[in-house]
Image: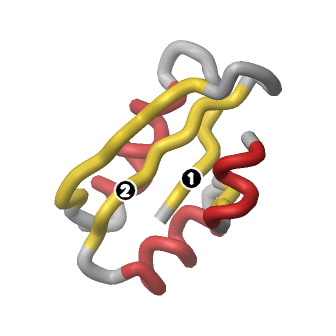
Amino acid sequence: MSVQIPDEEGGLTELLRVLSEADISVEYLYAFVAAQGGHAYAVIRVEDNAKTEAILAENGFTLLNDEALWQG
């Protein structure tokens, strides 16, 4: 799944804190910064996508589909 995170110090840390507090294990993660827009993105692999999507949405994270991710 793809998640938009702030392109600022601590942006990735906040994402990982939310996942950790919800007992969601990350199998792997790729993070990168967009050329425009002031955002960074994380592509994460988790066991339970539905639970993770709900937790991230509750905590104000924006989830992206493939099209939105590549438009950055």
- Residue at 18%, 60% in the rendered image: 27
Q: Element at badge 1?
A: strand
The quarter holding residue 8 reads top right
Q: Is residue 6 above or below residue 17?
A: above
Q: Amino acid at mark 1?
A: Val
Q: Amino acid at mark 2?
A: Ile
- Residue at 53%, 57% in the rendered image: 2
Label 1, on which residue?
A: 3
Q: Is residue 5 left or right of residue 45?
A: right
- Residue at 65%, 27% in the rendered image: 34
Residue 63 place in picture, x, y as percent: 64, 62
- Image mark for residue 44: 2
Q: Is residue 48 left or right of residue 35?
A: left
Mark 2 Cα-neighbour bin, 10 Å: few <14, some 14–19, many ≥20: some
Q: How many marks?
A: 2
Distance from the alpha carbon under mark 2 to that under mark 1? 8 Å
Residue 28 place in picture, x, y as percent: 22, 52
Q: Element at badge 2?
A: strand
Along the polypeptide, which appears first: circle 2 or circle 1?
1
